[in-house]
């Protein structure tokens, strides 16, 4: 069961494009990878980190973080990723591992869509020479599969919804929310879509088939934001294809990625062979003597990728989905608003990722139900000002919550 309020990004895409390699590189969790379709069957779950600017430097304190490392003023905040089985065309009809893949994705709040930017895997995930497949077809095909899957779920209950609304005067938004909540689609998502388009400004029994398809497509975009991790930038054709994708899919975040290279760098850093942090634009060899010729050659190639692309793109993709698309931002709860400590004296012990728009009371509930229920007021520790329950927190706020119900811990 995921922690309330903490959003999960699903790693999705066609089979055999590097999803599990991306997952292993970002979480260092063991997951099977291989150059053929349907390697992953059961989903892999693991913890990656996103970088946020800590407030320790602004407040001029030395912190004692409990749940996230702080290195040179950068907090590495844990986030959860889920890597699922790949899909092939007509997955929503059960082809390949279709329904399995899609069902495992119910719990994801946003998607990192991994594609083979070199076009070196065909529609069914079989290897082919770079440049054979147009990666833009992969983007369209995945979006269509997900929309059709959601539509299928809605259609199972459509007659009942229509009857409820037209004959029993039920609220359509309530009925739609009940039907779609299992897909992490909320009342807010539904209302946003209905308000944004005139097509939906009529009773649901008058919606045509194409209105319904369009509704679900809009709902997919609204409820499952996506970034495109254009993988395999080490292969020929990837660069041209990525330029093409960026011009074709305006408004999408497309990030060139080298999952295999990131995995190699993370492994080498773990073994103490190099100094490298995810997202870095370079690495440093710590002891040349410990490296085999093959390793040196591999690192040289990776160095060239970093020079051309600025990074492997893996860390950027994870940060793009959480920060830019899911609009998560860090806040720092404390118990002493003057010293920025918890009751044990730890300075800035915790950081929480919350979604923009979260209120002070919403944060209290995130920390503990008792804190939320007994909420009296909060204090902005940076200014010392009292804040009320419906105050919307800002990026990097440091907050003390005062509650009638205390929490021991
Ligand atoms: N050239 C290149 N190959 C990569 C890269 N990332 C992954 N691969 C290779 O792509 C193949 C498939 O990788 P996986 O991570 O198993 O792919 P997947 O998408 O999880 O596949 P399924 O679970 O079978 O759907 C493996 O042979 C990887 O080594 C990359 O950045 N560059
Ligand atoms: Mg896999």
Image: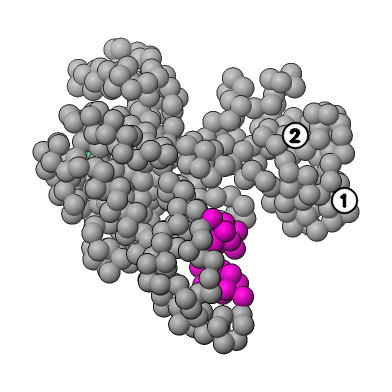
From the image, which quarter does the N terminus lie in?
Answer: bottom right
Crowding at dot 2, Cα within 10 Å, few <14 / some 14-19 / many 20+, comes out as: many
Residue at point 38%, 31% (across, down): 313
Viewer-closest of 231 and 408:
231
Q: Position of residue 128 (x, y in %)?
A: 11, 43
| Residue ranking furthest to the top | 288
Please tell me in which quadrant of the rendered image residue 286 appears: top left
Drawn side of residue 129 relative to residue 199, left or right:
left
Residue 266 lies in the magenta-colored region: no
Q: Which comes sooner in the sequence, label 2 or label 1?
A: 1
**Which label sits on residue 398?**
2
Who's the residue at 17% across and 29% down the image?
236
Task: Report which quarter residue 277 is drawn in.
Answer: top left
User: Is residue 222 toward the left or the right of residue 403 in the image?
Assistant: left
Q: Label 1: few (<14), some or many (≥20) within 10 Å? A: some
Q: Which mark is residue 83?
A: none
Secondary structure at badge 2 equals strand
Secondary structure that dominates the magenta span: helix
What segment is highlighted magenta in the picture? 171-196
Query: Image height check: is 49 above or below 389?
Result: above
Image quadrant in which you'd find residue 165: bottom right
What percent of the width, then of the height, locates residue 153? 41, 71
Q: Residue at x 77, y 38 (%)?
A: 399
| Residue 83 in view in this figure | yes
- Residue holding disc 1: 376
């Amino acid at each position: 069961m995921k922690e309330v309020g903490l959003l999960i990004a699903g790693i999705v895409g066609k089979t055999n494009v590097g999803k599990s390699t991306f997952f292993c590189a970002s979480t260092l969790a063991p997951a099977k990878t291989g150059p053929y379709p349907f390697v992953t069957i059961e989903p892999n779950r693991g913890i990656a980190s996103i970088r946020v600017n800590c407030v320790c430097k602004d407040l001029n304190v030395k912190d004692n973080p409990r749940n996230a490392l702080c290195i040179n003023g950068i907090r590495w905040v844990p986030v959860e990723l889920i890597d699922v089985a790949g899909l092939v065309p007509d997955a929503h009809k059960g082809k390949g591992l279709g329904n399995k893949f899609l069902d495992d994705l119910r719990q994801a709040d946003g998607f990192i869509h991994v594609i083979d930017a070199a076009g070196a895997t065909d529609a069914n995930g079989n290897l082919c020479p770079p440049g054979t497949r147009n990666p833009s077809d992969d983007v369209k095909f995945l979006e269509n599969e997900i929309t059709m899957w959601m539509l299928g779920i809605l259609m199972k209950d459509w007659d009942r919804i229509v009857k409820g609304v037209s004959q029993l005067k039920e609220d359509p938004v309530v009925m739609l929310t009940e039907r779609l909540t299992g897909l992490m689609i909320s009342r807010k998502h539904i209302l946003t879509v209905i308000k944004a388009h005139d097509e939906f400004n009529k009773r649901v029994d008058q919606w045509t088939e194409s209105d319904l398809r369009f509704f679900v497509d809009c709902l997919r975009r609204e409820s499952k934001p996506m970034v495109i991790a254009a993988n395999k930038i080490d292969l020929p054709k990837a660069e041209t294809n990525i330029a093409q994708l960026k011009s074709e899919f305006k408004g999408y975040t497309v990030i060139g990625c080298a999952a295999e290279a990131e995995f190699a760098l993370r492994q080498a850093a773990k073994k103490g062979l190099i100094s490298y942090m995810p997202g870095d634009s370079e690495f440093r060899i710590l002891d040349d003597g410990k490296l085999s010729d093959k390793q040196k050659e591999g690192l040289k190639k990776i160095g060239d990728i970093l020079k051309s692309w600025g990074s492997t793109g893996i860390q950027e993709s994870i940060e793009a989905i959480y920060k830019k698309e899911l609009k998560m931002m860090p806040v720092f709860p404390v118990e002493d608003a003057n010293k920025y400590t918890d009751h044990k004296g730890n300075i800035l012990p915790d950081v929480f990722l919350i979604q923009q728009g979260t209120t002070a009371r919403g944060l209290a509930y995130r920390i503990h139900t008792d804190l939320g229920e007994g909420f009296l007021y909060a204090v902005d520790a940076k200014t010392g000002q009292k804040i009320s329950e419906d105050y919307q927190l800002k990026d990097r706020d440091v907050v003390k919550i005062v509650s009638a119900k205390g929490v021991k811990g």
